[in-house]
Amino acid sequence: MIIIQIAGGLGNQMQQYALYRKLLSLGKEVKLDISWFSEEVQKKMLAPREFELPLFKDLPFEVCTDEERDRFLKQNLFSAIKGKITKKLGLTASSNPNVFVETKMYHPEIFEFEDKYITGYFLCQKYYEDIMDELRELFVFPPHRDSDLAMRNRIISEKMERFPSVSVHLRRGDYLDPANVNILGNIASDDYYKNAMDYFLKKDPETHFYIFTSDHDYAREHYGDISRYTIVEWNNGKDSIQDLMLMSHCKGNICANSTFSFWGARLNKRPDHEVIRTYKMRNNQPIDPETMHDYWKNWILMDNKGNIV
């Protein structure tokens, strides 16, 4: 059996689920561990999270039992001692041979596992690119809980389909915190957004941009021209998932270095759609163009100066 830990926000949970479906497609016995969302764990978190995969309508998955999880995570005396030594040496990989910890962008060895507990975020598109059609069918959006806003979303999505449309995701909020700036800041820069929008405008000067962000004041200040931009600010709380639905209807997607906007692009069923994503996800991530194009086939990679890589 393989058990995948589900953790983090909705975008990360969707990636872990995507790997789950990929391993199932290979004939593996796979279950999910959702214990990270227990009250005991979440009360220690600076930013508590909820298990949000059930927001999707009838999403199928199987959760492991406590006993199945403990079979992997409970170490014998030798492993426990080895773990303490590993921690003292500053190593990050798990000392438990039953546990696999993600340490780089892509681990093809995962597909050979038969009996392992897996933890990581599995952002890389290469993990599940070949089952994206299946994932698009599985991630079924629920209706908005407010019928008036549901109608508004329906009207907007139809407009996105009929006219040249591009979603733009601005991830600010926690990315502006001093603790996060060095790692996540100045990646989706002003130059990045300007040149990404110019890319689509050169193809069609009539392109309309739909702005998705939690920082609505910033959006109104920078994208207030309603003839060119629509700021989507009515899908909040558990209904934020509706933003993913709207992104998926656009002809183009401009992503922040954020898993949320990646999924708005991934779930896009339009055969003519184009996606621009940041060349980097994190400033401390070693990357090179050849590898990134292999890991993100058919995605347009743009650096923080606005250059296509």
Image (cartoon, rainbow, N blue to C red):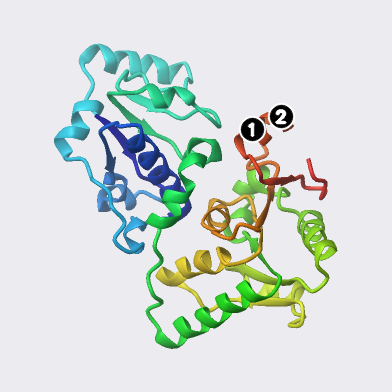
Residue 88, visible in the rendered structure: yes
Farthest-out residue, front: 271
On screen, 118 above or below 255? above
* Residue placed under numbered mark 1 in the picture: 294
Residue 50, visible in the rendered structure: no
Tell me where residue 251 appears, x and y as whole percent: 65, 64
Residue 230 in which image quadrant: bottom right
Q: Are marks 2 and 1 in contact (CB under 8 Å)?
A: yes
In this image, 142 relative to 268: left or right? Answer: left
For residue 290, which numbered disc appears in the image? 2
On screen, 44 above or below 113? below
Three-letter code, disc 2 = Glu
On screen, 143 above or below 139? below
Label 1: how many residues lie within 10 Å, few (<14), some (14-19) or many (20+)?
A: few
Residue 68 in which image quadrant: top left
Tell me where residue 80 appears, x and y as whole percent: 27, 18
Query: In the rendered picture of this protein, how many numbered marks are placed on residues?
Result: 2
Say what secondary structure mark 2 lies in: helix
Residue drawn at x 42%, y 28% as measured from the top left: 101
Tell me where residue 299 appears, x and y as whole percent: 66, 46
Say what secondary structure mark 1 lies in: helix
Residue drawn at x 49%, y 26% as measured from the top left: 107
Residue drawn at x 70%, y 42% as measured from the top left: 279
Q: CA distance from mark 2 to mark 1?
A: 6 Å
In this image, 225 relative to 3: left or right? Answer: right
Label 2: how many residues lie within 10 Å, few (<14), some (14-19) or many (20+)?
A: few
Which of the pair 65/150 is nearer the observer?
Answer: 150
Three-letter code, disc 1 = Asp
Which of the pair 57/32 is nearer the observer?
Answer: 57
Quadrant of the image containing the C terminus: top right
Tell me where residue 61 appears, x and y as whole percent: 27, 48
In this image, 58 relative to 248: left or right? Answer: left
